[in-house]
Every structure is written in structure tokens, then in C-alpha cells.
Amino acid sequence: MSTNTPHAGVAVVAARAPLEIIQVPDLKPAEGQVCVEVHWVGSTPFDLHQADGGLRVEPPQILGDTAVGVVVKSGEGVEHLKIGDQVFGFLPPVHKQPSQQEFITVPAHLLGKHTLTTSACLNFTLPFPKPEKYTPSDANTPILVWGASSSVGQYTLQLLKYYGYTNVPVTASKRHHQLLRSFGATETFDYTSPEDIHRLEALLASESQNGRRVNVLDNIGSVQGSMEPLARITPPGSLVAVLWPVIKVHAEEDIAPEFTLDTQGVVNWKEGVKTVGVSTHSYEANELRKRDLQPLIMPELLAQGIITPNATRIVEGATLLDRAQSAIDILRRREVSGERLVWRMKQA
């Protein structure tokens, strides 16, 4: 239910148009919901896909899917949060409460407290907490992480290391290799180096010849930037997961981006290679993940140091609109590498 009190949000009003500030109503929390005053937000490639490519946009539409702030109101039935709690959250678009606005009213299961310790045993895709002496049956299966310095890539590496996976080659710019090795990469390759790519191809071929299926996570999802190189070096019979949407044409100052959800037909994979598109926005389809991932698992992973937050780059600007537009411009110029863009909703 809305109130008569409006607040500011950063919105796309048309594809490739400058962002604008719009006024939207505060929403009173319903049962199971909380209202959060947003202090910090992150700008991601998905924001650029929406601002420049109009991906899933009905203008005027507020941007953003990550937020940090403080609970200011709570609906009935919320148990793990109270007014005054500092929280962080990832907000799938289905909830229609994007983060780049002064207040968000969202289901409490989308939020976790900054610190939390729990000994609850959670039934998840991988067991959490991890049982003592746990070792996965396929610990030595090859898992290539392409674009490992990205946000998703860094978290993937840390989780694979925690659960005992021991055969995780990665690609990234050379300046990130030391960090990625500390996160669990077993071998590092510079995707800009033909020599490194040749070595990687030989490594994957050797794994395949030894009877191991090669698994690949493409964190970039770019036809030219990642999928075409992968198609040349990935052995027959491999499994490739590609982060959606697939970018056919990258956004430029004077070029509109183009996207597709097709992961199989956009490049010429070798015989038997299977591909699957991956969306981080659909995790709530699994009821256990919906219930436990953000309220319990994410805070615990951070509290125990199992995962380390991304390095951040703070985007400055005199006004809310300045900061939001600067972040989009930085993403469009593809200046971000190994870090996350963050900025304040309000100046301190």
C-alpha cells in the first residue's frame, strides 16, 4: 500500500537517454516485508543493459538490484530483522523494487544483516555449513572460470575453494592473477595473450583426453569477447554455462547494444558441447534458496570469511543524479576491472 509521501529514484526514461530523477511513493510494508532506507547502491552491467539496451524496461523505470541500508519499518511476521538493523540485499526485478531509490519496500528474505552467526544446518545445493572433512566426489573435475576477476567470478572461485574443488583454471587480466590464486585458482591465463590461450587449450584438451568432462563458467557472456574464444578451445563434450544476457553488440557512446538469450547457436561449438544460460535473478525458483540464501547463508559466508567482498570503486558526484549517471558512463566505457562500482544515495 502506498502513502502520500514521495521519495526520489534514478530512472531510465528512454533507451540511451540521460538518466532522470523521478518521484515515487513510499510503500507501507505488508506482511513479511520491510522498508529500508537505502544508503549505498552498486551499479552493474545489468544497469547498463537496461539504460542503453532497454532490457526488460518499461520507462520510466528505476535502476539497480543491489542495496545497503537500514530497516526503518517492518511488516507483521518478520523474524530475522528489526527496525535499525543494517542490511544488504540483492533484489530480483520480479519484486519491482529496484535499489536506486531512497527507500525500498521488499520481502524480508531478500535481505541479510551485516553480521550474523548461526549454526543452523541448511539444505542447499552444496551443504552449508560444510560438514567436517567434506570432500566433493568430483573434486578434481576441471572447472574453467572465464572472466574470473568479475564479481561473479571472484565469488565462484572462493566457494569452489571452500568446498574443496582442486582443478580450477581461470582467465583474467594478468594484474588480477595473484588475487585470483589466493581465491582458489589453480592456474591463471591472460585472455589477451595468444600464448596463454594456446596453453589453456592444451590443458583442456589433456583433461578431455583423460576422460574428464570440461566444465566452463563464462562470466562475461559476450559473443566476441568470450564465447568465440571459448568455442575455439573448449573440447568436444564439454558443458558451458553462460551468464545471461549474451551480448551480441557492446554499448558504446554512439552504438546501441544488442542481446540474445541463445547460448548454443550464436557461435560454432565443437561436437557435443552443451550450453546453458544462467540468470542470477531466478534463484528464488528454488524454495530453500529463496528462504535461506540472503537472510542466513550470505551473512554467514561473510562473517566466517569464506568469501571476501569485491574491491570497490566509489563513484563521486555532487548530486544523486551525477553519481548515477557517472556510474553508467563508466560502465559504458568498460573501465571496470576486478572491482564493483558503488555510490551513496545521499551525501553524508
Image (cartoon, rainbow, N blue to C red):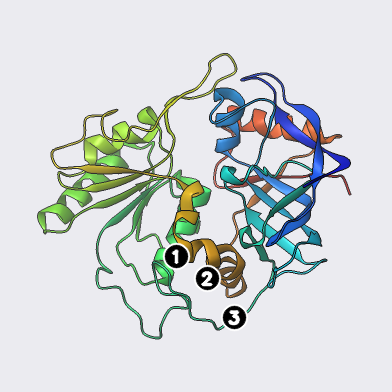
Image point (72%, 26%), residue name: 19
Q: Are marks 1 and 2 in contact (CB under 8 Å)?
A: yes
Image point (47%, 66%), residue name: 288
Q: Are marks 1 and 3 in contact (CB under 8 Å)?
A: no
x and y percentages locating residue 330 in the rendered image: 64, 32
Of residues 254 and 4, the one drawn nearer to the viewer in this rendering: 4
Left or right of 339 on screen, residue 213: left
Mark identifier at residue 306:
2
Please tell me whether mark 2 sits on a helix, a strand or a loop.
Answer: loop
Q: CA distance from mark 1 to mark 3?
A: 18 Å
Image point (41%, 74%), residue name: 127
Q: Name the residue type under label 2.
A: Ile
Q: Give the residue pinned by disc 3.
A: 118
Q: Name the residue type under label 1.
A: Leu
x and y percentages locating residue 318 in the rendered image: 86, 34
Around disc 3, counting alpha carbons within 10 Å, would you say few (fewer than 14), some (14 to 19), or many (20 or more)? Answer: few
- Report the residue that reaches farthest toward the bottom: 132
On the image, which quarter does residue 42 sit in? top right
Left or right of 127 on screen, residue 270: left
Query: Is residue 149 visible in the rendered structure shown here?
Result: no
Q: Nearer the viewer, mark 1 or mark 3?
A: 3
Q: CA distance from mark 3 to mark 2?
A: 14 Å
